[in-house]
């Protein structure tokens, strides 16, 4: 592992903030929150003038203070997959802070199944070069296959439509026409350069672990992405790396017992990159949520309890 050292001008503030992690955890981070009309209404929604008064008494005690709700929600909802980063290095202490916070993720019986490889500088460039060479080798690229199925083998609705939409939306932003295989290949190749990020993560898991540990792993990964947002950094989780797990295992000298889960880019988002303007959609809560209040055969007239 390499230490990225001092960091650039852009990071000095972040550095100071992250130096006192506890301060960062208690103070909402509204940097980048512009005083636009839209944001006024966002803030009004977060902080309704009479919000506390309107909330039922028995729920008031369950709520943390409103600024922390706003800070946590802002970190979660401002996370997006970023696909072009600035070269500014991320200090090692900041990476360690993020991983320390993320490791508070729950895991069944606290087994903490995650293993993290942090790549920067020459190590990152070396792995990237090895994978890009394999990706660009039409004769042998097909010999590289995932060693676990990330996606369903059979695509059904609505997942297929959602998958297609995000792909075409990204390509449209980048001006990549349908059928332009060379441009698509070039865009996909950017995965393996960690989208120019100064930090690349490769996540591995012990092969003896079962499906439950992969569930735990997802929570850990999400924690990394949220903790990064709280510090003004961005990420892109990347399953693309799993195809080249043999190269990764060789370069990182992984034991045969280790399996590559995915990669992730970490750094400062390039604010001028068109691909970073992609905002993906989500289904409405009532499209995926089923509230159950009545026992089967129960009295449908029973009033629903205040939730
Ligand atoms: C585990 C995982 C793997 C992903 N792999 C890739 C990837 O290899 N390349 C990529 O560009 N995006 C990848 N993504 C990003 C998704 O495309 C993205 O999360 C989704 O389109 C929703 O957009 P958002 O993250 O901006 O909200 C991955 C996301 C997850 C959770």
Image (cartoon, rainbow, N blue to C red):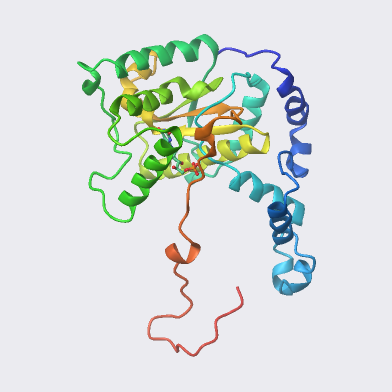
Above or below 111: residue 294: below
In this rendering, position of residue 226 left or right of residue 242? right
Which sits in the foreground, 38 or 286? 38
On the image, the x and y values in percent for residue 291 come to 47, 71
Q: Is residue 250 visible?
A: no
On the image, the x and y values in percent for residue 13 come to 77, 27
In this rendering, position of residue 142 left or right of residue 56? left
Rendered residue at 27%/33% (across/down): 179
Rendered residue at 74%/19% (across/down): 9
Tell which quarter ligand 1 is in: top left
Which sits in the foreground, 219 or 114? 219
Above or below 144: residue 62: below
Q: How many marks?
A: 0
Rendered residue at 40%/44% (across/down): 166
In this rendering, position of residue 294 left or right of residue 97? left
State which quarter of the image contains the C terminus.
bottom right
């Amino acid at each position: 592992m390499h230490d990225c050292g001092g960091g650039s001008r852009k990071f000095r503030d972040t550095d100071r903030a992250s130096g006192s992690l506890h301060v960062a955890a208690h103070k909402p981070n509204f940097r980048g929150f512009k005083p636009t009309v839209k944001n006024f209404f966002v803030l009004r929604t977060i902080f309704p003038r009479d919000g506390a008064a309107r909330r039922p008494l028995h729920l008031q005690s369950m709520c943390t203070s409103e600024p922390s709700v706003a800070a946590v929600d802002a970190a979660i909802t401002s996370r997006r997959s970023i696909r072009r980063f600035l070269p500014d290095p991320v200090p090692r202490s900041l990476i360690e802070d993020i991983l320390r916070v993320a490791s508070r993720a729950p895991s069944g019986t606290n087994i903490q199944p995650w293993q993290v490889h942090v790549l920067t500088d020459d190590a990152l460039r070396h792995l990237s070069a090895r994978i890009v060479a394999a990706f660009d080798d039409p004769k042998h690229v097909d010999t590289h296959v995932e060693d676990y199925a990330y996606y369903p083998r059979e695509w059904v609705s609505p997942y297929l439509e959602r998958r297609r939409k995000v792909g075409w939306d990204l390509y449209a932003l980048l001006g990549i026409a349908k059928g332009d295989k060379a441009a698509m290949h070039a865009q996909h190749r950017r995965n393996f350069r960690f989208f120019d990020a100064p930090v690349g993560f490769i996540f591995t898991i012990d092969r003896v672990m079962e499906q439950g540990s992969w569930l735990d792993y997802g929570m850990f990964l999400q924690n990394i992405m949220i903790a990064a947002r709280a510090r003004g950094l961005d990420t892109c989780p990347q399953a693309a790396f799993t195809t080249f797990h043999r190269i990764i295992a060789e370069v990182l000298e992984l034991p045969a017992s280790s399996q590559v889960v995915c990669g992730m880019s970490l750094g400062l988002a390039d604010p001028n990159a068109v691909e970073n303007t992609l905002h993906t959609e989500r289904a409405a809560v009532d499209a995926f949520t089923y509230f159950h209040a009545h026992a089967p055969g129960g009295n449908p007239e029973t009033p629903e309890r205040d939730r």
